[in-house]
Image (cartoon, rainbow, N blue to C red):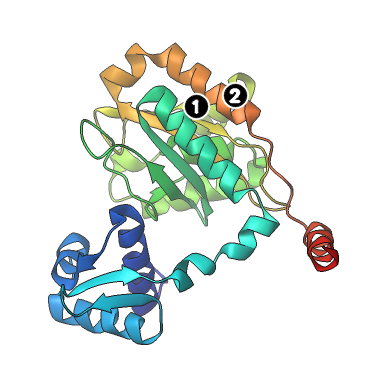
Amino acid sequence: MTAGVIKSAERVLAVLEFFRTARRPAAAMEVARTLGWPQSSTSVLLRSMVTLGYLDYALQTRMFMPTLRVALLGDWLQEAGPVTPLTDTLAKLHKATGETVILGRQHGAHIQYLSVVREGEGLQLALKAGLLRPMTLAALGQALLSAMVQKEVRGIIRRNNAEAPSPAFRVSERETLAKLVRIRRQGYVVSEAIINPGSRVIAMLLPPQTDSVRLAVGVGGPTHRLMERFEENLDALRLYVRDFRPAVMSKAGIASRSARRASA
């Protein structure tokens, strides 16, 4: 379990992430096996979500499936920010490169993957939405660090180093600060395959999505394949990042959209 997170809350969100990836009904046994949970407690959780209206249960097939209520939980984000253009951009980038496309944001001293777009077969990065990585080691995390002030960067470096499971996952503060200067200058970063040996990620910052949230996007895959087409992958990343024009989320913007709907 992620440190500082209530277990029951983490499990509910893990169930929703499971169905987001599966995109079909599933039995309790499959959910339990995929998430590594006991089947008995998984069944209890799924039935509780049915009672609350977030899952449907088909008695004939014994399958669970999210309800429309789940989809509507974030419908207001369509008004407050560029959800659809962003997901379209990720899909187009995946189609252009044929590689795994990752969207992430800062979560404390970590990068959290919000969306992972990939094919179901072939060599791909073993990533999933919701995964946390130290910002100092992940390409998307380093891209986000490049937009921060030095004091904040130093704090994150020290925390990541303190929580590192071994010396191999610690970084030099001086070398990291120097690398961030290069990232700002060139506009992208390539991971060093520390966390996932044999794989790499090319990452860039997206334009600001809201008044306070910065996102990063990356293209990743096996090192040999990604680097053989490095220039093509980088060009595709630059193209879709440049073409993405987010709307800034603000109270004034939401209010104006609400007023237009009311007068329509």
User: 206 or 143, which lies in front?
Assistant: 206
The type of residue carrying mark 1 is Val
- Snapshot quadrant of residue 232: top left
Dot 2: element: loop
* Cα gap from disc 2 to disc 1, whole angstroms: 7 Å
Picture quarter with the C terminus: bottom right
In the rendered image of this protein, does residue 103 appear above or below residue 6? above
Judged left or right of residue 244, residue 26 is: left
> Where in the figure is residue 42, as x and y percent of width and height?
21, 76
Residue at coordinates 45% horizontally, 12% vertically from top-left?
231
Query: Where is residue 70 drawn, in percent x and y?
Result: 45, 69
Amino acid type of the residue that numbered disc 2 sits on in the rendered structure: Gly
Q: Which residue is mark 1?
A: 189
Image quarter hosting the N terminus: bottom left
Write the residue at 66% across / 37% down. 207
* 159 to the left or right of 245: left
Q: Is residue 13 above or below residue 217?
A: below
Helix, strand, or loop for circle 1? strand
Query: Residue 156, position in %: x, y?
Result: 52, 49
The image shows residue 228, relative to residue 112, as above or below, that is: above
User: Disc 2, disc 1: CB below 8 Å?
Assistant: no
**Quarter assignment of residue 41:** bottom left
Residue position marked by numbered label 2 in the rendering: 187
